Amino acid sequence: MQLKTSPFIVETQYGKVEGVPVDSTGDVAVWRGVPFAKPPIGDLRFRPPQGPNGWEGVRSAKNFGTVSPQGYWGLNKYVSQGAEQDEDCLYLNVWAPSSLPADAKKPVMVWIHGGAYMTGSGSTPAYNGEHLVRTGDVVIVTINYRLSSFGFLYVDIPDIETNLGMQDQVAALRWVKNNIEAFGGDPSCVTIFGESAGGNAVTTLMAMPSAKGLFHRAIAQSPLPTSVHSRSEALMVGNNVLRELGLSKPDASALRAVPADELVSAARAVFHKMVLERPGVMPFSPIVDGNIIPQDPLAAIRNGYAKDIPLMLGVNKDEANLFHTMDPKHPAVPLTELQIERYFSSNTQAGAQIQAAYPGFPALPARLRLASDIAFCIPTQRFAEGHTKSGPTYMYRFDYAPVVLRWTGMGATHATEIPFVFGTYNSNLMSYAAIALSFGGQYRRLSDRMRCEWTTFARRGVPADESWTEYKQERLSKIWNGVDSFEKDWMKEKAEVWSEFRPYTDF
């Protein structure tokens, strides 16, 4: 059995990297800022990722790599843990037991961060993988990828590639396949998991030919699975970006010469504009281009494209509350009365029937429930239904809201399940307050149960709880709360009301 060079030095196919222990026990190590592709700068801007350059000697992997320029809420310590932002951002991080031999073959879990494809990074403190490693006997990888205009711009300009953020994710998965065994991981047992845009990335990767064989299980948390663009929709967004930049008929060299901060500003302006004018799809999203993404992922799943992939997916009870709190004027989901009116403009009669199913509409509480269903619950239920025809599917709903979130009216809102999945209680002020003002033991026990389920699913492709049966059998969903339970077909009535409505007809 071949051991690592040392507990913290690992040899990849590109060279040796030296990580560090996460604490004084030394039992878990982290390798930060490991490059999985060449810096996508200069002539490589708007081009697919290329394999990284090798290096001589031992490369330090003690600090996080730079992260993609942040196109919406801005970069802060919570998002990046102090990492700088730069187009040179294609780095990943690995957490693993430091004493493992190279052929230990532990299940691998690759986390894809969220942030509306506009913000976020693999170095966010809430995504610290050490607790999953300790309690789940797995290897954790978190990745960066190109965001906003850098990763999802679609324009009618020769030599400007698209879906680059998705191609970055495939490149990271390819790196995992070729290198993770040296960290004690099993390249034949890889689970991709992600939340929000990261959950959307999971459901999209399930439909991408280039990702086939690079992962074997999938977990999609609040995934927005229908938030993908047709080419015409994506071109509408791209042309708006060009107008913001003042470029009427640019060529590839002119677009590559635009300063990064101007691309960030243009993306931010277009995001604010498009969530109001074309609500329901994140402005910068994967594009069904007929090549990298050959068809709408929902259609692909219904046709059995990912038939060999066990899937766990779910939503939070109060998804939309966060978006109203963050930006009530430009919420990223259809939440204002104007957004909702435009969302239903393609079929106003069906829209009126749907709105009538939300008592109190158009008051804010009803709009919050409607927005949660528009963006998350209905698309996720449709994706689950589609996958049940050909692959094991397990659905959940996260209902737990600590006292502090109930007091503030946030409830079990978007992203609140993440600290429970990772066990990162000390990652931010909200987590501290939740423990201080709630039953801390209950908080931790729920996290223990969720981490057990996530890592068991990564290992076996089925939940640890044998009562949690496949969705196709009884439309059963696990309800995560202080005391967990199950509900049968909890979306039935709403799904029937929504059955005939599609917001846009491009697919």
Image (tube, grey):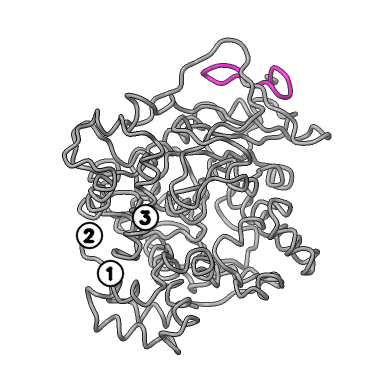
Q: Which residues are magenta?
A: 4-16
Task: Please tell me whether mark 3 sits on a helix, a strand or a loop.
Answer: helix
Residue that carries the numbered disc 1 in the rendered image: 503
Between residue 128 and residue 507, name the one nearer to us.
128
> Residue drawn at (37%, 77%), measured in percent from left and top?
337
Q: Amino acid at mark 1?
A: Pro
On the question of residue 1 being in view, the answer is no
- Furthest residue toward top: 56
User: Is residue 396 depicted above or below 406 in this figure?
Assistant: above
Judged by depth in the image, the label closer to the viewer, 3 or 1, is 3
Q: In the picture, which quadrant includes the C terminus?
A: bottom left
Task: Please tell me whether mark 2 sits on a helix, a strand or a loop.
Answer: loop
Mark positioned earlier in the residue sequence (3 or 1): 3
Is residue 10 found inside the magenta-colored segment of the image?
yes
Mark positioned earlier in the residue sequence (2 or 3): 3
Is residue 479 found inside the magenta-colored segment of the image?
no
Q: In the picture, which quadrant includes the N terminus?
A: top right
- Furthest residue toward front: 246
Residue that carries the numbered disc 3 in the rendered image: 271
> Residue drawn at (80%, 32%), measured in percent from left and top?
26
Q: CA distance from mark 2 to mark 3?
A: 22 Å
On the question of residue 170 being in view, the answer is yes
Crowding near pointer 1: few (<14 within 10 Å), some, many (20+)?
Answer: some
Q: Is residue 341 left or right of residue 111?
A: left
What label does residue 507 carry, if any? 2
